[in-house]
Image: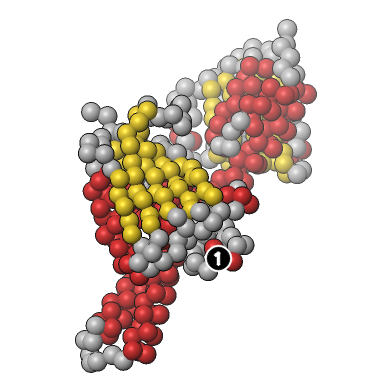
Amino acid sequence: MWKSYPSCSIDRELNATLEVDRAMRITLDWAMRQSDSQAGLIGILKEEGVQIMAHQGYGTQLALYEETPLPLELASMISAIDSGQPQHITLDPKVEGGLLPGTRTQIVIPIRREGKVIGLILLESISDTQADIGFLGRLSDHAAIAISNAQLYAEVEAANIAKSDFVSFVAHELKNPMTSIKGYTELLAAGAVGAVSDSQANFLGTIRSNVMRMSTLVSDLNDNSKIEAGRMRMDFKANDLADIIENVIRSTNKQLDDKKQTVKVELPNELPEIWADNTRVEQVMVNLVSNSHKYTKEDGEIIIGAEATKNQWDPKGAANVVHVWVKDNGIGMSEEDQKKIFTKFFRSDDQKAREAPGTGLGLNITKSIVELQGGQIWFDSVYGEGTTFHITIPVAEK
């Protein structure tokens, strides 16, 4: 008695994956169960034969074809490809007509997509089998869609990786000339080759400022491409947050001094170590402090604070975290901007906000880095009064 399986169950299983190998295994499993076959395989059609993606019941018999396509030597396979129709034949078990020794029943189901055979399902049994060919044909149609979707997804993933590699290569190649321009500009400004007039100093300052903007843009694009391709690497270890914040203040000191802004650090005397990537946490904090700097007027104040606390923001995250915040008394954000602030390439329509240069990637990258390290990020903002960004970082367990 044949069991009936609703097509929605098959679709649910097949659509739950975008991996070609898994879609193939699911399809073969359904075909084997429905036909009561002792052995079976499923593969993608190549010029040289069938590239086997999954098989059952053959043991080590198909070991030779793990890398090399299975030759199209079975008459039933050739007929299925030529006609595009399922083949159900009975063989003489005394004559070697199948891959499984003693094969009595052989079924070949072509997997078609847009009228073209793209793969095959081979089912073999040593007994007479009355398979539901209609069901197996419908199964192959479902599989064709899932396999095609998985292949398209794999192509998109490959394109993303290629794009990431290209952006990384360009970023690497741009770093050397930008470093050279920045270095020579600073030498000229310092009078290394003679006195510099006020006008020349202004020009050199403009060059240096634009090189810094280019450097930030290249770095942001590089990080964004790595995150999109899932290739952002993290070096997790126990770190002292106070040391990281000290480095952040040191690296942002000049830009803060240029606007006569002050930074107040409010850290408890004893703060547990955090479990994170030191460099990436520093990058996050620099982004948040630089963001506050850009949108805070001259003589403004930025406050960096932290506390050790139970994780009340993410029940599935680490039990204990360090809650860090960066608060400013800048221009704040409108309610409309607050909805889009973490969106990639977002730039506010507010005239005051648009006066500050930026790529629109900083906060998007910051959010991704925080979440990749098991933390959360959010903010409080009042338009015209200021903004406070909050992040959590897991505590390093002893």
Q: Is residue 139 above or below residue 258?
A: above
User: Which residue is the site of mark 1?
Assistant: 352
Image location of residue 220, percent across then percent down: 44, 59
Image location of residue 55, percent across then percent down: 54, 27
Q: Residue at x 37, y 84 (%)?
A: 202
Q: How is the image coloured?
A: secondary structure
Q: Residue at x 33, y 85 (%)?
A: 201
Q: State the residue in front, 296 or 62.
A: 296
Q: Is residue 112 above or below residue 132?
A: below
Q: Is residue 105 above or below residue 361?
A: above
Image location of residue 129, percent across then percent down: 69, 14
Q: For residue 113, which quarter of the picture?
A: top right
Count of numbered marks? 1
Q: Image quadrant for the N terminus?
A: top right
Horizontally, residue 260 falls left or right of residue 57, namely left
Q: Residue at x 47, y 58 (%)?
A: 330
Q: For residue 316, which quarter of the picture?
A: top left
Residue 139 in view: yes
Residue 42 in view: no
**Considering the numbered disc 1 on the image, is that residue within a helix, a strand or a loop?**
helix
As drawn, the residue found furthest toward the top would be: 1
Horizontally, residue 14 falls left or right of residue 393, namely right
Q: Image quadrant for the C terminus?
A: top left
Q: For residue 169, which quarter of the picture?
A: bottom left
How crowded is the residue under tag 1: few (<14 C-alpha within 10 Å), some, or many (20+)?
Answer: few
Q: What's under tag 1, amino acid-wise?
A: Lys
Q: Residue at x 39, y 49 (%)?
A: 326
Q: State the residue in front, 348 or 135.
A: 348
Image location of residue 283, percent across then percent down: 36, 53
